[in-house]
Image (spheres, helix red, strand yellow):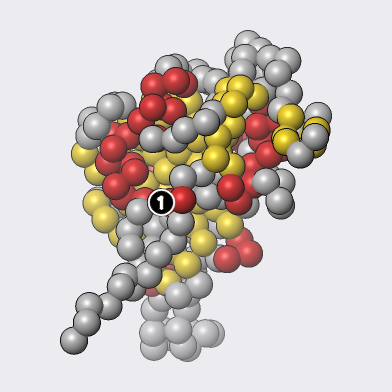
Amino acid sequence: MSPRMGKKRVLYGLAPDTPHGFGYEMSWIAVLTSDTEAVLDALGVDGETASNWNSGIGTVYDHWLGPERVFVSPPVDGWTFVVSVALPHPVGPGYIDKCTPLLVRLARKFVDVQYYFSYPALDFYSWVRFRDGQLVRAFASTAQGVIWSKGRYTRAEQALGLKLFEFRGVRGREGDAGSEILMSPTEEQVMQIARSWSRDPTTLSASDASPALGYITHAPLVWRTERVRKSAA
């Protein structure tokens, strides 16, 4: 059962339940820890409320509640998931990067921290991994092309069968096309990276973990996208 309204407040399910899948049209952080409360502390969020998987995933996918809520899951195979479309996203020039500082803060406390974003409506796909406090790889592409490409091309990306130059486009190519070609990642390829590095969240099922509770919290205002302010002349 999804969250429901009661006397002007949202009521979340408190009956412990087993994992529910997510991932499509969503962003999430996978943190290698079974300490859900430690993840909450590292995120710097306040006012968390206990919630089961059903209400938690239902909330972040809700058109009204989702843009302002975050679900921090119970652990699954040693991984805790932070799920929300309100997470800071990779941005290009002209915007303040709020995604990297958040991931760096988490990476200082946890050995493996991964960020994913898959949203076909925006043609936005991303994967980022920090290991032992160091950036391993950061990739993000939008309709405008690649906006992040940091670190070495990984084996997991090679397994997708896509070359980085294909993401960026090829001009003047001979053959049937004879013009610019732009290849973009897909949702399934984002999930393949997640499957290689941690867990594909779309495949989570009741058999993956015992019934438990996670937390719902409001997304901090400081996570909202901001343009870089131009200095006065």
- Res 182 visible: yes
Quarter of the image containing the N terminus? Answer: top right
Q: Nearer the viewer, residue 76 or 74?
A: 74
- Total label count? 1
Q: Nearer the viewer, residue 190 or 1?
A: 1
The vertical placement of 32 against 231, above or below, is: above
Q: Who's the residue at 31% across and 50% down the image?
A: 100
Q: Is 102 positioned to the left or the right of 81 in the image?
A: left
Residue furthest to the front in view is: 7
Q: Who's the residue at 47% across and 33% down the image?
A: 46
Quadrant hosting residue 95: bottom left
- Res 190 visible: no
Q: Nearer the viewer, residue 53 or 215?
A: 215
Q: Mark 1 is on which residue type?
A: Val
Q: Who's the residue at 65% across and 32% down the image?
A: 56
Residue 27 in the image, given as x and y percentages of width and height:
53, 47
Residue 89 in the image, given as x and y percentages of width and height:
44, 55
Residue 150 in the image, given as x and y percentages of width and height:
26, 55
The vertical placement of 91 against 36, above or below, is: below
Quarter of the image containing the C terminus? Answer: bottom left
State the SS at label 1.
helix
Quadrant hosting residue 144: bottom left
**Dot 1, crowdedness within 10 Å: few (<14), some or many (≥20)?**
few
For mark 1, what is the residue?
222
Q: Who's the residue at 52% across and 85% down the image?
A: 177
Residue 21 in the image, given as x and y percentages of width and height:
66, 33
Residue furthest to the left in view is: 233
